[in-house]
Amino acid sequence: MDPIVIASLAGIGICLFLLLGPSTKWMKWTGSIFVRLVVGAVALFLLNVFGGVFEYHLPINLFTVSVSGLLGFPGVLMLVAVDLFILPF
């Protein structure tokens, strides 16, 4: 797409957002998802730090952060199980 079209659409979106006002329900939902993703990334980082003792590393990417953030501790356990039991084959 042309940069002028993209800038125009962004400008229209910002103007509509300012005129109509933010939806608090949408902002709460987005904020909650963002906080969960950050907590998931921190959990994976800590897993890699403490897993370094056992020479275990789980990659931190969008998929693993999403699974660990949205599913919580069971999601992290599932990622570890998949990494240990399914991926080596």
Image (cartoon, rainbow, N blue to C red):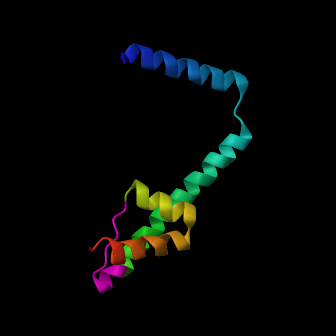
| Relative to 82, residue 51 above or below | below
State the predominant SS element of the stretch in magenta: loop
Q: What residue is shown at x 35% (from left), y 80% (from top)?
A: 51
**Residue 86 position in % (x across, y down):** 34, 73
**Which residue is most to the bottom?**
54
Left or right of 25 in this view: 68:
left
Residue 4 belongs to the span the image colors magenta: no
Q: What residue is shown at x 40% (from left), y 14% (from top)?
A: 4
* Location of the C terminus (image quadrant): bottom left
- In front: 10, or 71? 71
Asked if one can make out residue 7 in the rendered structure from this viewpoint, the answer is yes
* Location of the N terminus (image quadrant): top left
Q: What residue is shown at x 53% (from left), y 62% (from top)?
A: 69
**Residue 5 position in % (x across, y down):** 43, 14
Q: Which residues are magenta?
A: 51-60
Asked if one can make out residue 39 in the rendered structure from this viewpoint, the answer is no
| Relative to 87, residue 4 above or below | above
- Which quadrant holds residue 63? bottom left
Left or right of 19 in this view: 51:
left
